[in-house]
Amino acid sequence: MKHRKKMPFTDAVIHECQRFLDVVPLNIFHCTTAMINFRGYTIPKGTVVIPLLHSVLFDKTKWETPHSFNPGHFLDENNCFKMNPAFMPFSAGKRSCVGENLARMKLFLFFSTLLQNFTFSSTDDPANIHISPVAGSFIKLPRLYKLLVKSRA
Ligand code: HEM
């Protein structure tokens, strides 16, 4: 894990995959436990709130090219890793994902170990590949692809 800081591009690609996949676009529904005022709106107790993560992950005021896969969203001018506060696939606040640190660690270890040990290529012309996810009723999923995987050993 200590190598992650020295691998800004890998880290940026993983973050951009998570942003672009937008796996839980509607987040999990929440409900107000008391009446609250939020940005001038009064929200009564018991109101169902749907905190749209999609709107943050694709906000054109927060991302240079929100609808394109662009690891540059997480790199500064020196190609060092740069976090973006609008990166919130794990949600935010008191009820955000408790597994975030574990998930982020696993994503890095799996992704980097696979790339260290195998070369991946497409059986199809990359120009014909649609990288946008498929939207289900609740979550988005990656499309199915045919891959050629060769051991680097
Ligand atoms: C890439 C992987 C993961 C993503 C994108 C993800 C995303 C989320 C999201 C969006 C929520 C809803 C937060 C909210 O209600 O505002 C959530 C909640 C939760 N996640 Fe994850 N999660 C991931 C992995 C994990 C893992 C590995 C664990 C456990 C080891 C975990 C445990 C939980 C739990 C227990 C909650 C409910 C938290 C609460 O209601 O207080 N998640 N997750």
Image (tube, rainbow, N blue to C red):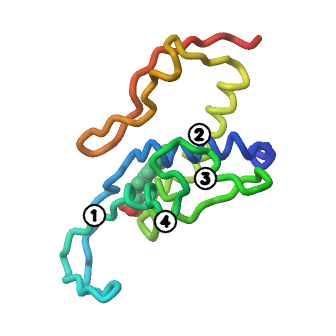
- From the image, state whether disc 2 or disc 1 is nearer to you: 1
Q: Is mark 2 within 8 Å of ligand 1?
A: yes
Beta carbon of the mark 4 residue lies under 8 A of ligand 1: no
Give the image location of residue 125, x and y in percent: 51, 16
Give how far apart the Cα atoms at labels 4 and 1 are.
Answer: 21 Å
- Secondary element under disc 3, as helix, strand or loop, is helix
For disc 1, the neighbor class at 10 Å (few under 14, some 14 to 19, many from 20) is few
Confirm or deny contact between disc 4 and disc 1 (CB under 8 A).
no
Q: What amino acid does circle 1 point to?
A: Ile
Q: Which residue is mark 4?
A: 61
Q: Residue at x 35, y 40 (%)?
A: 140
Q: Which SS class for mark 4?
A: loop
Residue 109 in the image, given as x and y percentages of width and height: 66, 36
CA gap, disc 3 and disc 1: 26 Å
Q: In the image, 1: left or right of 44? A: right
Residue 130 position, x and y percent, is 42, 29
Labels 4, 3: front one: 4
Which part of the image, by quadrant, shows the C terminus?
top right
Q: Residues within 10 Å of mark 4 (few under 14, many from 20)?
A: few
Image location of residue 86, percent across then percent down: 51, 63
User: Which numbered disc, 3 or 1, marks the residue that appears first in the sequence?
Assistant: 1
Q: Nearer the viewer, residue 109 or 25?
A: 25
Q: Residue at x 72, y 57 (%)?
A: 76
